[in-house]
Amino acid sequence: PFLITGYIQVTFTLFVVGIVTYLVIQFMASVQHDLQLKAEEYSIEITHQVAECTKAYYTNRCMPGERVPAVEAFCKEWEICMGRDPKEVGR
């Protein structure tokens, strides 16, 4: 009887450990997936911002040689904005 009880206890313990391990792995995968989705959203947002900056840069003729002194500061900001890398999220 003690041998059978021992086997049942070991089996039950392994079963519980397996379930807990599975739940921990699922939780970690869920968190990783959520972080990846958030990074993709942020990357898309940066891509839109870069497009807006590029449009403003060329609309206001910020190219060197055509730049008007009154918009010099804005041109520099748009130039920096245009150089942002959408794939470099959270680094």
Image (cartoon, rainbow, N blue to C red):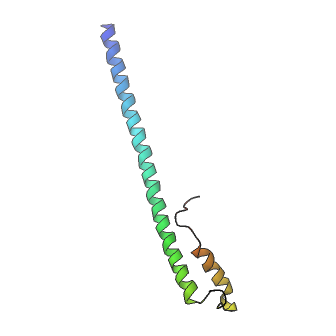
| Quadrant of the snapshot with the N terminus | top left
Q: Position of residue 44 (x, y in %)?
A: 46, 68
Vertical side of 33 occupied by 75: above or below? below
Label total for image: 0
Quarter occupied by residue 8: top left
User: In percent of the image, x 55 and y 79: which residue is there?
Assistant: 53
Q: Is residue 29 above or below residue 45?
A: above
Quadrant of res 14: top left
For image coordinates 45% across by 49% down, the residue present is 31
- Where is residue 17 drawn, in percent x and y? 39, 29
Task: State left or right for residue 17 relative to residue 43.
Answer: left
Give how far across and how far down residue 80 sits, in percent: 62, 75
Q: Is 91 situated left or right of 39 in this image?
A: right
Q: Residue at x 70, y 91 (%)?
A: 69
Residue closest to the far front: 65
Can you give x and y, in whole percent of width and height, for residue 88 in the image? Answer: 55, 62
Q: Residue furthest right?
A: 69
Which picture quadrant has residue 21?
A: top left
Residue nearest the observer in this picture, 20 or 42: 42
